[in-house]
Amino acid sequence: MSSVAERTETGQGRIAPDLPLALPNARAALLQRQNDAEGRPLLVLYALGKEVSFDHPRQFALAERLAAGVPLTLAECAADLGETEAGETIAALLGAGLLAPADEVRASLALRHDHRRMPDPLPVAPLARPRSWMDEESLMAELTGRALDLAWLEAVVPVFRTAHLFLDRDGRQVGEANVFPPTARLAVETDWRGCPYAGNRYQPDKPMNATALRAMRKHWRQMMLLLGAVREGYLVRFPAARAGWTIGHAERLTVCALALPSLLLLDCAAPVANGALHPALSNLFRVVDGVRLVLHQMLFVPVHEPMAGPHKLVDADRILAYAERNYAFHSDHGVCAGPRFMVEDMLGVLLDGAAPRSGLDTALEPELAAAARGIPQAIDHALLGLQTHAAAFALWPAMAETYQALTAGLSGRAQTEAGTALVRRFEGHFEALSHRSFLAVPEWRAHRAAVYDDMFAQAGEGLGQSPGAALSARLSPDRRDGSAHAALAGAIAARLPGEDPRLASDLSEIIVAFLERARLALGEIEAVQSAQGRLLGRAAPATGLTLDDLNLHNLLMGADVRSVPFLSDELLALFGVTITVTAQGIAIASDAADPAGEVRQPHPPAEGRRHAPGGGCPVPGHGASTVRKHT
């Protein structure tokens, strides 16, 4: 064994073969059985922000001991793996910080935070008093500086978020700590506790909301009865889902459940007053929204694993495993308070129609039974909202593509100082797009377009609409607005004196193609929102929807989280043009007062974390075994 000890060295020196070693904070570790690309079994350990793949069955016992927090020695490991493999494996795990002397690990257990009171992790709540989108005084104007006709609400606030800021009868906002927009969160007394659950939710610096957990337990049986009723209503519209749930079906089902309280709160004929919503409905919203967020991450987030398509089959086990290994139970400030058995029960009701372990009540309370009678209308509300969401959000990949095309169109063509400044500016935008956005890669943009196509089409099917062209085809302009092109090209040329006039024309061509796409999107949204307005009893809009209205979603975030500026804002800053896009057309007005204004110097790309997984350091000599850091 001495030969093994001599090979097993770290920056702290040699490790004695009989020294007990253990995984620090093993309670926070997660071990999952998976398959590699060739279908061979492997175990993946997620611990301390890293993941370790064990690709051979002889290594599985080691992985299981690590995850269980059972100490091991180098000598014991060598008996199972052989001296060379054991030495290299232990050295790699030590180097990655995934092993430490067992006595040190035991000492750290005294610091366990299970269910201890913890300080409120949330920033100061911005909103001083309860508000809603139904208020006569425009909340949108208060939050963004720009009012929005209620007829267009779901174009700016997605249908699965419109209920967030309303209060229930417990005096808590439907969205709890995750209220959208964050600028509309109210300060509500909350019992924050250390999370006691094993797995990556066991974080010393991220508490769970124990107040929300107690409310959820109180109403659980009624919530699950309601959820089952929504499921049955969904299957009437989409009977194919009975043969197997896809990610797309599961996401639509969750949005239908979220739309039930939204419908009650936004129904202009007889709205539930802000502060009067039954807590079973608000708690149902919160727990189902957690599932929706996981499904959204599967579809749209290419960080730790590739994005999935909407037709990929899923079940409760796959969703839960994905959520665990991709930290979907985490928010910026806390972790999900629901114990695993309740999450499993909820997924069983949602996808399998199974009864939870605690059973179901024989009937809904009268108030909830009345709400359940509105499930068909809630499904309509959800599906119309998803069509609006798809049409509106399909513009963001197109805008990113436009920025990339403008950067390419400027490359190598500048001949003047003003032109060179413009090149540097757009190169900075492209750099920011590449580092901060899930829209930087053409394949990612194509994937999003396909998901939005499916979302729009499948929602239409559930609404009984006749199949038509794909959304991406409907948003592809078949003409160019010649007057808009000429006006924009003239404004660009005026700010770039001395440059080849063809440069201004080419840039205008790229921009107007996007504006035409936006015009078509606004037309689709207005048509869908017209049906939404009839469903909710809204008054006809006093004004049409504009491209700048859609930017209100970004402004509602409370901080500019975009990787590039909103395109019409950037064009105003650069070329002194005010662009107004409606479903009817494109209007471009130049700032004649300053035709020779200078292009401002390029600004550095906005800072933010790079959306890419961390690099890997291999466990040497053993194929696919890796230690990868999670960012």
Image (spheres, rainbow, N blue to C red):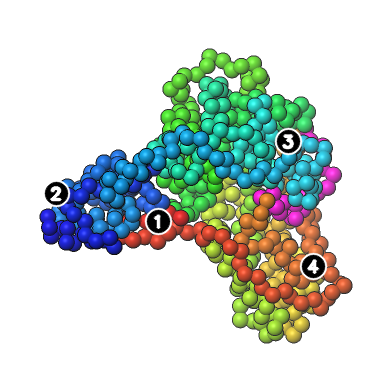
**Label 3–label 2 contact, CB within 8 A:** no
The alpha-carbon separation of the residues under discs 2 and 1 comes to 29 Å
> Label 4 neighbourhood size at 10 Å, few (<14), some (14-19), many (20+)?
many
Residue type at tag 2: Ala
Q: Viewer-nearest of labels 4 and 3?
A: 3
Q: Could you tell whether 531 is left or right of 89 in the image?
A: right
For residue 551: magenta? yes
For residue 447: magenta? no
Q: Which quadrant holds residue 418?
A: bottom right
> Label 2 neighbourhood size at 10 Å, few (<14), some (14-19), many (20+)?
few
The residue wearing badge 4 is 577
- The image's mark for residue 130 is 3
Q: Residue at point 76% right, 77% down?
A: 598
> Label 1 neighbourhood size at 10 Å, few (<14), some (14-19), many (20+)?
some
The alpha-carbon separation of the residues under discs 3 and 1 comes to 42 Å
Residue type at tag 1: Lys
Q: Earlier in the sequence, mark 2 or mark 4?
A: 2
Q: Earlier in the sequence, mark 2 or mark 1?
A: 2
- The image's mark for residue 629 is 1
Q: Earlier in the sequence, mark 4 or mark 3?
A: 3
| Mark 3: secondary structure | loop
The alpha-carbon separation of the residues under discs 2 and 4 comes to 75 Å
Q: Which quadrant holds residue 136?
A: top right
**Label 2–label 1 contact, CB within 8 A:** no
- The region drawn magenta spans 537-557
